[in-house]
Amino acid sequence: MAKALESQGAKVYITGRRQEKLDEAVKQAIHGNIRAIRGSITSREDVQRAVDVVTEETGYIDLLVCNAGQTTFDTKVWRNCLETKVAAVFTTTMAFLELLGAGNQRRDSSKPTSQVIAIGSLGGLLKASDSFIYNASKAAVHHMMKNSGNFLVPHDIRTNVIAPGWFPSDMTASASKTWDHPGGVLPRAVVPRQRMGLEEELAGTLLYLMMVTDGGFLANHAGTC
């Protein structure tokens, strides 16, 4: 998603806990406009530091994408799951509200307004016997963003959620290894098209949501990919 936005001319700031992953993402920038800020979204201090960096360097943002996840759980990390996937989406959005508002001030009223896009999951819309903690957290994100959309209307800030299915990532690697999928064919019961999603499919969805082409329909109706 960072690559897709940067390839279209955006200056992109990314955050994460692992410096090597951040460095790898920066190297993939086409125009050299991906900037990494190391930190955890569960740390309010780290989030505020990111806000301060962006404020100093640009003074505004047009889009905030909330995307973090994990799949290994036990009772000790249950609270951390909710902190990472649900609470951090809210606290990060609140932290960047002023910058999103500043983005609106730069545009005339005919242009799309600033927006928050949270990355949910198809799991937040379905039921499964082996990932109910993850699915419950993503369902919470979906509903929270619906309510946030109403809350942020007076500020002219849009909200949306992308609910991906299975895409290649560090998070899905361990789960996919348990499947018998020679040649990359996945179980039809899990993935009807029997393959992982493609990078450009997720990127295209993100770029589409940045445009106002549907009269606001998707603000209240979930779309999946």
Image (spheres, helix red, strand yellow):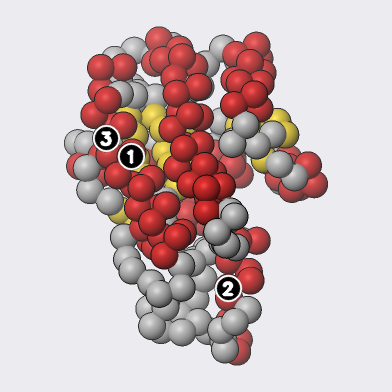
How far apart marks 2 and 3 lie (CA) works out to 32 Å
Q: Quadrant of residue 74?
A: bottom right
Q: Quadrant of residue 19?
A: top right
* CB contact under 8 Å: marks 1 and 3: yes
Give the residue number, with chain letter if any, for mark 2. 175
Q: Quadrant of residue 210?
A: top left
* CB contact under 8 Å: marks 2 and 3: no
**What is the three-letter code of the residue carrying label 1?**
Met
Q: Residue at x 80, y 46 (%)?
A: 20
Image quarter in which the C terminus is found? bottom left
Q: Position of residue 192 (x, y in %)?
A: 38, 78
Q: Mark 3 Cα within 10 Å, few/some/many (few <14, many 20+)?
A: few
Q: Secondary structure at mark 1?
A: helix
Q: Position of residue 102 (x, y in %)?
A: 45, 12
Q: Judge from the rendering whether residue 184 lies leftward or rightward of residue 90; answer left or right.
A: right
Q: Secondary structure at mark 2?
A: helix
Give the residue number, with chain letter if any, for mark 1. 144
Task: Identify the mark at residue 147; answer none if there is no mark.
Answer: 3
Q: Residue at x 50, y 29 (%)?
A: 92
Q: Is residue 140 above or below residue 179?
A: above
Q: Position of residue 42 (x, y in %)?
A: 59, 36
